[in-house]
Image (spheres, rainbow, N blue to C red):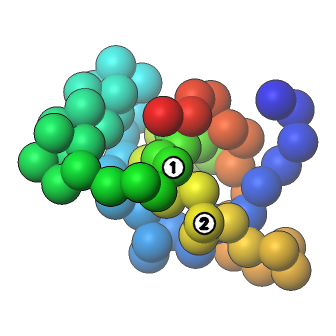
Amino acid sequence: MNEAVFFNPGDAIASSHDFKEVRRSVQIIKAERPTERQIVIAKNDKSGIYAVYYADKMQEDQTGTAYHIEDKL
């Protein structure tokens, strides 16, 4: 997906420079707190940090920080 999406960095569930570490964090989160909400892993192209967000936290008005979706869970 090449489209930029916007999130408030304060809404991140987890973050790291390592994609595999973030993916493991998502697996733990889903096991400990099952939810129907979709979780996404997004990458900030400027800082290279991967962050985990609930998909419904995407900002429609392009405020916040631009990310690119790397994975949807």
Q: Amino acid at mark 2?
A: Asp
Using residue 27 as the reference point, say whether residue 28 is left or right of it. left
Question: Where, quadrant-wise, is the N terminus in this rendering?
Answer: top right
Q: Nearer the viewer, residue 64 or 52?
A: 52
**Quadrant housing residue 5:** bottom right
Q: Residues within 10 Å of mark 2 (few under 14, many from 20)?
A: few
Q: Check disc 1 and report its element: helix, strand or loop.
A: loop
Q: Nearer the viewer, residue 35 or 14?
A: 35
For the residue pair 4 and 54, the one nearer the viewer reads as 54
Disc 2 secondary structure class: helix
* Residue type, mark 1 in image: Gln
* Residue named by callout 2: 56
Percent across and percent down for residue 7 are: 63, 66
- Which residue reaches farthest top? 20
Residue in view at x 59 percent, y 69 percent: 57
Residue 30 is situated, as x and y percent measured from the top left of the image, at 25, 42
Residue that label 1 marks: 38
Is 8 rendered above or below residue 45? below
- The reply to whether residue 45 is in sight is no
Binning the other alpha carbons within 10 Å of mark 1 as few (below 14), some (14 to 19) or many (20 upward) gives: few
Q: Residue at coordinates 88% horizontally, 42% vertically from top-left?
A: 3
Is label 1 in contact with label 2 (beta carbons under 8 Å)? yes
Give the alpha-carbon distance from disc 1 to disc 2, as whole Å.
8 Å
For the point 18% across and 54% down, which residue is it? 33
The location of residue 64, given as percent across then percent down, is: 69, 74
User: Is 23 left, or right, of 67 in this rendering?
Assistant: left
Whether residue 54 appears in this view of the structure is: yes
